[in-house]
C-alpha cells in the first residue's frame, strides 16, 4: 500500500500561541509531498520534524490571511539556497505571486528554480490537479476573504491480476475487462473468466479533505462525501458561536456536524483561537456529535491505511 | 541607573538552523523597548522569553534580506490584534512599506494603529532619532544591498545636585552651571560653590552598536569609538574568508579587528552560517585578537551597567 499521510505542522489561528504554530501541513501521497498552507515558521517545523523541504513539488495556499502564508517567502528562499532546480507549483488566490515577487525584488534575489503560481478561483467543486495515481479538487469556503478547501483523492486503482491464475490464451481486451473489475463472458452469456478467481480486489481509493478557514457551511458535506479524513477548522467552542459567525469561523460542534453529514471516517480539528489554553474541550464538544474526532497538535501524523471492517484504519501518531 | 539591555532573539543567517532563529534583538533603553531586525518567528521569540510586544515603539530594520525582516508583517498584525493604538515608527530601507501594505491589501486588513515608515538613506554616520535621554545614529555598512548599522547612545546626563549641600540663596543660573559640571565663581575669580562639594558626578553615557550584515569594513571603527557593546556579524570563520568577501559578510577575526580598532568594551558575535553546527570556534578565533568576546545565543541578555574600574560592567545572562 502506497503511503497516504498527513503531518500537522501548525494548529494555531491568527494570534500567536506558544506551542501552536500557524496553519501548515505536509501531505505525503504515494511518492509526492504536498504542502498545504505555510504559516510563519513552517520551514523550521519541517526541519524540526525531519521532513524533506525540497521534495515538496506542490504547495496549496487556502487564502491570503497571514497565518496561512507568511512562512512561504522564507521557505521558497530556503529551497533555492538548498540547491533546488525542480519547478515548484503554488496554488493560491490571486495576489500571492505579486507579494513574493515584490519581496524578491527588494532583496535583489532570484530563485534558482521556476516557481509557478496558479491563481485559484471557482464557485463550486472543481478539479485542480491530476497526477497518475491521485488528484486534487478544490471548492470555495465561506470566509472573510476568498478561501478554498482542498480534496486529495487517490484514483481508484484497478483490480490486481493474479498472473498464475490467468488462462494462457487471454486477450488484451479481456485483461482490460478484468482490471475494471468485470468478469469476462462468452458470447452465449456464460462466464468465461470469473473475476474473483483471477484477480485480487483493488484497494479502496483513499481521500483527505482540508477545510480551513470557514464559517459553518452545511453544503460542504456534499463536496467531501465519505472522505477518510476531514481536517476542519474549529477556531472556537460553541459557547462563542456568535463570535465564530462574525469572524467567519467554525465551532467544534459545527465541524462535527459537517463530518457527520459527510459520513467521513475521521475528523481532525485545528486552527484553535489562542484564547483557549488547552484544546481538550474541542474534542469533547465534537464527540457529542461525531465520535472519531481528534484534536490536532504540532507533530501529529495521520496515516490512512487500507480500510478494513472493524479496524480503525486511520491511525494517529506523534512524529 | 536606568536599564540598558540587549535581548538576543536570533543568531542565524539566511539558511535556517534549528535553535538559531534569524536576526532579531530587543533593546531596552531606559523605559523604551526598541526592536532591531525582525527575522521569521520574532513574535514567537518575544513570547517565548516573556518580552513585551506592545511596548515596542521603534523598529529598526538593517536591510531587506529576508532573514532580517520576514517576521515583521506577522508582528505588526499581532500588535494590532493585541489592541495596540500607539503609533509605531519603523526605520527601514525603502521598499518595506510597499511590501507590508501589499500584504495588508490582499488580506483585506488594516492595522488599528498608525505604522509610520521612515526610509533610511545615508552615506555617513547621521542622527536618526533623538529622545530626551538617548539617541540613535545610523551609518552605511558594506553589504550586497543597502544595509545600515545602528548606534544607540545615552545622552550624557548632567551632574546630580546634592540638595542639602546647596547654599540657600543659590540662583537658577548657578544651578545650571553646576549641572553642566562647572564650579560657580565670584566676580573676582574666587570659587563661590565648588562643584564636587554640592554634586555627584554624572554616570557615564552608555552605548551599543549593531552591525549586521557587512563585509569587513575597517573604517567602521571610527563610527563606533569606545562603545560599551558591539554586536558584529560573523557569518564565517576565517578559513572561509574568501566566501565572506564574495557574499559581503565578515569572519570572526574581522569582527574582532573592528572591535579592537574601535576600543569597544565587549564584542558580541552573531549571524552564524548554518554550516557551523557549533559556535565555540567563533569565540576562540575572535579572542586571539579581542579578548572580551562572546558568542550570541538565543535568549542571551546583555546588561550594560555603570562602568567602574576593574569591574566587568557588561554582564551576560541567559533569560
Image (spheres, coloured by chain):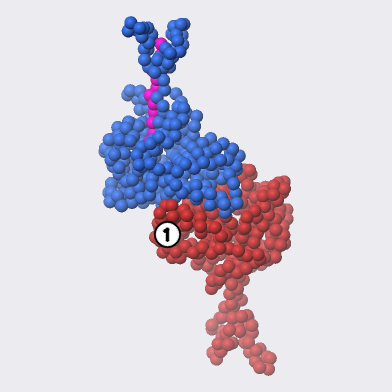
Chain colours: A red, B blue
Residue occupying the point 37% across, 27% down: B313
In the drawing, does residue B200 fall left or right of residue A187? left
User: Visible in this render: residue B78?
Assistant: yes
The furthest residue to the front: B187
Quadrant in which residue B279 is drawn: top left
Q: Is residue B205 magenta?
A: yes
| Nearest to the observer: residue B42 or residue A144 | A144
Name the element at disc 1: loop
Q: Could you say where residue B212 lies in the image, as x and y percent from the top left?
A: 38, 43
In reply to whether residue A42 is colored magenta, the answer given is no
Residue visible at 56% across and 89% down? Answer: A171
Q: How many marks?
A: 1
Above or below — where is B292 with respect to B194? below
* A166 relative to B239, above or below: below
Percent position (x, y) of residue A311?
A: 64, 64
Residue that appears at 54% across and 58% down: A95
Where is mark 1, residue-wise? A111
Dot 1, crowdedness within 10 Å: few (<14), some or many (≥20)?
Answer: some
Q: Is residue B190 left or right of residue A148?
A: left
- For the N terminus of chain B, the image quarter is top left
Of residue B172 and residue A206, the one placed in the foreground of this image is B172
**In the rendering, at what x and y percent does residue B251 appear?**
31, 45
Q: Is residue B186 left or right of residue A139?
A: left
Residue at image location 50% in from the left, 29% down from the top? B31
Front-most of residues A216 and A133: A216
Q: Quadrant of residue B83?
A: top right
Q: Which residues are magenta?
A: B198-209
Chain ID of residue with mark 1: A
Q: Position of residue A222 (x, y in %)?
A: 70, 65
Residue B301 seen in the figure: no
Amino acid at each position: 500500500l502506497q503511503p497516504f499521510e498527513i503531518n500537522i505542522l501548525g494548529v494555531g489561528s491568527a494570534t500567536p500561541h506558544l506551542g501552536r504554530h500557524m496553519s501548515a501541513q505536509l501531505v505525503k501521497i504515494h511518492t509526492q509531498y504536498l504542502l498545504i498552507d505555510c504559516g510563519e515558521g513552517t520551514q523550521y517545523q519541517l526541519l524540526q520534524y525531519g521532513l524533506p523541504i525540497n521534495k515538496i513539488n506542490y504547495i496549496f495556499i487556502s487564502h491570503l490571511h497571514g497565518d496561512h502564508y507568511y512562512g512561504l517567502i522564507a521557505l521558497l528562499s530556503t529551497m533555492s539556497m538548498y540547491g533546488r532546480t525542480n519547478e515548484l507549483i503554488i496554488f493560491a488566490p490571486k495576489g500571492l505571486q505579486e507579494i513574493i515577487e515584490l519581496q524578491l525584488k527588494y532583496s535583489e534575489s532570484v530563485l534558482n528554480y521556476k516557481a509557478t503560481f496558479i491563481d485559484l478561483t471557482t464557485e463550486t467543486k472543481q478539479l485542480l490537479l491530476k497526477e497518475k495515481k491521485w488528484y486534487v479538487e478544490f471548492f470555495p469556503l465561506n470566509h472573510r476573504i476568498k478561501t478554498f478547501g482542498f480534496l486529495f483523492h487517490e484514483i481508484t486503482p484497478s483490480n490486481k491480476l493474479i498472473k498464475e491464475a490467468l488462462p494462457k490464451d487471454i486477450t488484451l481486451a479481456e485483461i482490460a475487462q478484468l482490471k475494471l473489475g468485470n468478469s469476462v463472458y462468452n458470447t452465449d452469456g456464460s462466464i468465461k473468466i470469473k473475476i474473483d478467481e483471477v484477480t485480487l480486489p483493488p484497494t479502496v481509493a483513499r481521500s483527505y479533505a482540508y477545510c480551513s478557514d470557514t464559517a459553518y457551511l452545511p453544503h460542504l458535506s456534499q463536496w467531501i462525501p465519505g472522505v477518510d479524513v476531514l481536517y476542519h477548522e474549529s477556531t472556537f467552542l460553541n459557547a462563542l458561536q456568535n463570535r465564530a459567525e462574525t469572524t467567519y469561523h467554525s465551532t467544534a460542534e459545527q465541524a462535527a456536524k459537517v463530518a457527520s453529514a459527510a459520513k467521513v471516517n475521521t475528523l481532525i480539528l485545528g486552527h484553535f483561537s489562542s484564547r483557549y489554553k488547552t484544546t481538550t474541550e474541542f474534542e469533547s464538544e465534537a464527540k457529542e456529535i461525531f465520535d472519531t474526532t481528534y484534536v490536532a497538535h504540532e507533530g501529529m501524523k495521520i496515516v490512512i491505511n487500507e480500510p478494513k471492517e472493524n479496524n480503525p484504519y486511520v491511525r494517529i501518531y506523534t512524529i
